[in-house]
Amino acid sequence: MFILFYLIFSIVTVVIDAVLGTAFVGMIYSLALLIPSLAIGARRLHDTGRSGWWQLLYFLPLIGFIVLLIFFVQDSQDGDNDHGPNPKDAALEGAAI
């Protein structure tokens, strides 16, 4: 949901910047969501059993983005990980009842 709202508001800021003829709104928006974006990425990497430091791959122009995309779409670890239970396990148990 975070990415969905992030993209929607990014489009809105692009339109506002186009109307105003500046990039100020988009820059403020990007800076405001930099830390939450890194936190969401670290949380997803933790769910797959990796450290949040893997986000440093963003500094590799194309290859880093592709590798991180693959890491982000992988399924979470089975059972509990270091940061809590897998929410899919609870949903599957509820569906089996």
Image: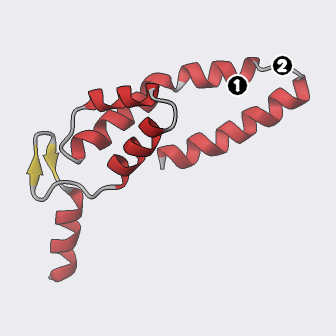
The numbered disc on residue 26 is: 1
| Horizontal and vertical percent position of residue 69 | 42, 47
**In front here: 68 or 62?**
62
Q: In the picture, residue 50 is in which quadrant?
A: top left
| Dot label at residue 57 | none
Looking at the rendering, in which quadrant would you find the C terminus? bottom left
The part of the image, by quadrant, that contains residue 17 is: top right
Label 2 amino acid?
Thr
* Other residues around mark 1 within 10 Å, as few (<14) / some (14–19) / many (≥20): some
Question: Residue at (48%, 50%) from the top-left corner?
Answer: 1
Give the image quarter of residue 64: top left
Mark 2, Cα crowd under 10 Å, few <14 / some 14-19 / many 20+, is few
x, y percent for residue 73: 36, 54
Between marks 1 and 2, how big is the CA–CA gap? 9 Å
Residue on which the image places disc 2: 22
Relative to residue 79, is residue 25 depicted above or below? above
> In the rendered view, would you say 74 is above or below 2?
below
47 relative to 15, above or below? below
Q: Secondary structure at mark 1?
A: helix
Residue depicted at 23% across the width and 48% down the height: 48
Q: Secondary structure at mark 2?
A: loop
